[in-house]
């Protein structure tokens, strides 16, 4: 049996069912994810919909409906619609097509649009639009697809489905391995914050003495007008203490051991300026600060120089999506940097190791007992302010043990990073193998006529 190469337009027919949005009608809207899933995005009353000229998805009349997003086709926003999205509305930027099942198996077509064979064609076509690149459906319909007989298409789908099932099992296992590494990280943090990660050494002394020295230093600075006197923090109650710590450790509030707690600059950062600005995206979930993808402010703004970061400052993310509020890192740089207003700078008295505090804040045990009960969500945005941060309670070891814990955690976290890198490499190889099998399945057999 021979294969032929046809235009996508030979097996698809575009349909457009125009609909004028009515103000008092409730409409369902859709999104196309980058994995090709066509899903419900939500519902909206007509008066809240800006574009009144919309188009209906008709699964009853066109059960094999293909839909894509003009601006996001390069990212994989193309898929087969299901009954769940029947009668949903879309804009003209999401064209719809009926798949001709007398010429092509819908499952075969679904494999094709997920393949590198298809993606390479998409990357080669001329893109239109200046602000946001897009591919018009007329261009899309001119792309080519290898077309064996319907019987061969069905066989290809069956063979690939078996391989894909095995591939899916591998992906699940690799996902489980990722979760295991995350659990391992948190287990190390939990052990560290309970004083179980490194050996205790009586020669380290007692952290109560350290805390008393810090309090005395703070009072001295306040008396000398070098530090502003703030509202006294409440004593720690027995019911606030979330877990046991070694006898030579002490519980304290973060505000007791910090000399400064400041919001970042409200000045709008841009691509020009002399001073780099750390933003939310510069702090990873693992507590690393990234000095890349930076924006800048002028060195002449009034917030500076008082909001310059110093080496060792803790940077806390106070507003973001719920799961990202609280991620913290330590600034390790001697260059002049500042931070954006949705971050908080915390500077500690010496001797307090800011990395030890950052590790505690990034631990699940701190998040569940100190942060989450106080995170406020408003209009889809989660917030945690400086007053609350100052009041969270911290398990404080002697400085020598803080140093040992930080060093041990760095070694263990690097081990976790190495494991994760190995897992990601396996994921990449697994995806490459899947695409290779798909590429071979869509390749025209030698000797067949074009």
Image (tube, rainbow, N blue to C red):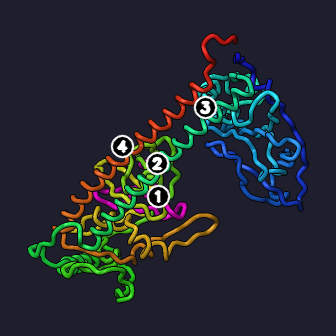
Residue 322 magenta: yes
Secondary structure of the residue carrying numbered label 2: strand
Residue corresponding to mark 4: 422
* Residue 287 shows in the view: yes
**Relative to 137, is 71 on the left or the right?**
left
Mark 2 or 1 closer to N-term? 1
Where is the C terminus found, in terms of image quarters?
top right
Secondary structure of the residue carrying numbered label 3: loop
**Relative to 354, is 178 on the left or the right?**
right
Count the marks: how many? 4
Mark 1 or 3 closer to N-term? 3
Secondary structure of the residue carrying numbered label 4: helix
Q: Compute the Cα span from label 1 to label 3.
A: 46 Å
Task: From the viewer's side, name the closer residue of 317 and 64.
Answer: 64
| Highlighted magenta segment, given as a residue range | 297-323
Q: Compute the Cα span from label 4 to label 2.
A: 39 Å
Residue corresponding to mark 2: 297
Q: Viewer-nearest of labels 1 and 3?
A: 3
Q: Viewer-nearest of labels 3 and 2?
A: 3
Q: Decide: is 105 above or below 366.
A: above
Q: Compute the Cα span from label 2 to label 1.
A: 9 Å
Q: Quadrant of residue 369?
A: bottom left
Residue 220 spot, x, y in % from top left = 23, 78
Q: Viewer-nearest of labels 4 and 1?
A: 4
Q: Viewer-nearest of labels 4 and 2?
A: 4
Residue 271 spot, x, y in % from top left = 50, 41
Residue corresponding to mark 1: 265
Secondary structure of the residue carrying numbered label 1: loop
Residue corresponding to mark 3: 115
Mark 4 or 2 closer to N-term? 2
């Amino acid at each position: 049996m021979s294969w032929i190469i046809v235009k996508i337009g030979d097996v698809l027919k575009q349909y457009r069912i125009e609909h004028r949005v009515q103000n008092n009608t409730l409409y369902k809207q859709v999104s196309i994810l980058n994995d090709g899933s066509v899903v419900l995005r939500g519902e909206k009353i007509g008066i809240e919909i800006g574009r009144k000229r919309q188009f209906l998805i008709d699964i009853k009349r066109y059960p094999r409906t293909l839909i894509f997003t003009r601006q996001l086709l390069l990212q994989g926003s193309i898929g087969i619609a299901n009954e769940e999205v029947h009668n949903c509305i879309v804009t003209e930027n999401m064209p719809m097509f009926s798949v001709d099942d007398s010429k092509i198996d819908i499952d075969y077509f679904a494999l094709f649009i997920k393949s590198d064979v298809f993606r390479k064609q998409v990357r080669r076509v001329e893109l239109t639009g200046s602000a946001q690149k897009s591919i018009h459906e007329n261009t899309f319909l001119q792309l080519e697809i290898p077309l064996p007989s319907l019987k061969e298409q069905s066989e290809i789908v069956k063979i690939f489905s078996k391989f894909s099932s095995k591939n899916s099992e591998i992906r699940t296992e690799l996902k489980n391995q990722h979760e295991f590494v995350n659990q391992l990280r948190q287990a190390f943090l939990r052990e560290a914050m309970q004083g179980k990660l490194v050996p205790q050494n009586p020669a380290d002394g007692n952290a109560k003495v350290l805390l008393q020295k810090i309090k005395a230093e703070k009072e001295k600075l306040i008396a000398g007008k070098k530090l502003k006197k703030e509202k006294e923090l409440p004593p720690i109650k027995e019911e606030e203490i979330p877990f046991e710590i070694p006898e030579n450790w002490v519980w304290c509030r973060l505000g007791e051991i910090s000399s400064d707690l400041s919001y970042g600059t409200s000045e709008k950062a841009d691509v020009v300026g002399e001073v780099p600005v750390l933003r939310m995206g510069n702090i990873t979930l693992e507590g690393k600060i990234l000095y890349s993808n930076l924006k800048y402010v002028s060195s002449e703004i009034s917030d500076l120089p008082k909001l310059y970061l110093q080496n060792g400052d803790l940077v806390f993310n106070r507003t973001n999506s719920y799961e990202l509020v609280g991620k913290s890192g330590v600034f390790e740089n001697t260059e002049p940097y500042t931070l954006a207003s949705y971050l908080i700078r915390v500077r500690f008295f010496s001797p307090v190791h800011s990395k030890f505090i950052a590790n505690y804040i990034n631990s699940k045990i701190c998040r569940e007992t100190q942060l989450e009960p106080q995170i406020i969500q408003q209009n889809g945005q989660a917030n945690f302010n400086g007053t609350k941060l100052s009041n969270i309670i911290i398990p404080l070891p002697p400085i020598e043990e803080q140093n040992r814990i930080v060093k041990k955690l760095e070694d263990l976290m690097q081990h976790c990073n190495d494991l994760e890198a190995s897992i990601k490499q396996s994921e990449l190889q697994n995806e490459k193998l899947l695409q290779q099998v798909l590429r071979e399945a869509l390749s025209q057999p030698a000797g067949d006529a074009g």
